[in-house]
């Protein structure tokens, strides 16, 4: 009798939310408090923002590099969101630990149909006012036209989500701490 090798199963905690909701801040704090957690660093073709670093915030790729990874089967999932390509590289997910990452709705839709993924999705939300203030304060010279474009696109992209998720408000410090504790309960 031979034993079948079990296929890899990836446990992923996914954070989604409109621009400025605080997804990255919450993720960084959860990772800081739970050192055994594996942070997923996604790939993107969007330009690097002020203060971001390659390999820390994203792997910033050209359109050609991104397409090559997709064609070669090196992407777990890939989508186009707000006119840029985003995706999760196969080598950025670890089957031996719990993974956490920030995703867009289309990426979650793809992952939710992947039998190798045990997916928990948290929708981080904040008021439009708080989101706008956070985005304006994120950079010394924010691109206001880009912020407005993202707001308009987010309303459409987050309007009717067709997958399961839990809502975590993030308007106050109390909300922020409660969101972190809720996510940490999944570990």
Image (cartoon, grey):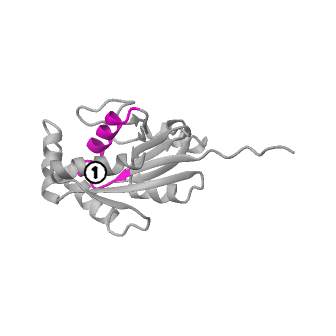
Q: Is residue 95 left or right of residue 50?
A: right
Look at 40% across and 41% down and name the residue there.
44
Q: How many numbered discs?
A: 1
Q: Which of the two residues, 176 or 104, is positioned nearer the viewer here?
A: 176
Task: Check disc 1 and report its element: helix, strand or loop.
Answer: helix
Characterize the local packing of mark 1: few (<14), some (14-19) or many (20 or more) Cα atoms within 10 angstroms: many
Which part of the image, by quadrant, shows the C terminus? top left
Which quadrant of the structure image shows residue 101? top left
Look at 32% across and 34% down and name the residue there.
32
Question: Which segment did they paint magenta?
Answer: 15-35
Look at 59% across and 47% down and name the residue there.
9
In this view, the residue farthest toward the right is 1
Q: Position of residue 165 (x, y in %)?
A: 39, 61
Q: Which of the two residues, 47 or 163, is positioned nearer the viewer here?
A: 163
Q: Is residue 83 something one can see in this rendering?
A: no
Please tell me whether residue 45 is drawn above or below residue 123 in the rendered image: above
Q: Is residue 38 highlighted in magenta?
A: no
Q: Which residue is mark 1?
A: 179
Q: Position of residue 185 (x, y in %)?
A: 37, 49
Q: Position of residue 40 (x, y in %)?
A: 43, 39
In this view, the residue farthest toward the front is 185
Q: Position of residue 23 (x, y in %)?
A: 29, 47
Which part of the image, by quadrant, shows the N terminus? top right
Q: Is residue 16 left or right of residue 6?
A: left
Look at 20% across and 57% down and name the residue there.
126
Please tell me whether residue 142 is drawn above or below residue 122 in the rendered image: above
Q: Is residue 27 highlighted in magenta?
A: yes
Q: Which of the two residues, 64 or 163, is positioned nearer the viewer here?
A: 163
């Amino acid at each position: 009798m031979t034993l079948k090798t079990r296929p890899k199963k990836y446990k992923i905690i996914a954070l989604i939310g409109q621009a400025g909701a605080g997804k990255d801040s919450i993720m960084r704090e959860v990772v800081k408090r739970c050192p055994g957690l594996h942070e997923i660093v996604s790939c993107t073709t969007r330009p690097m923002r002020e203060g971001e670093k390659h390999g820390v915030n994203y792997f910033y790729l050209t359109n050609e590099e991104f397409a090559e990874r997709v064609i070669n089967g090196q992407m777990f999932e890939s989508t186009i969101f707000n006119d840029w390509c985003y995706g999760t590289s196969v080598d950025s997910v670890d089957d031996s630990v719990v993974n956490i990452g920030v995703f867009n709705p289309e990426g979650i839709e793809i992952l939710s149909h992947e039998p190798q993924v045990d997916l928990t999705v948290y929708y981080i939300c904040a008021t439009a006012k708080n989101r706008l203030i956070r985005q304006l304060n994120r950079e010394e010279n924010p691109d206001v036209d880009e912020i407005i474009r993202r707001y308009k696109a987010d309303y459409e992209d987050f309007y009717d989500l067709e997958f399961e998720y839990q809502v975590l408000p993030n308007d106050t410090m109390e909300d922020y701490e409660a969101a972190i504790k809720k996510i940490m309960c999944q570990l």
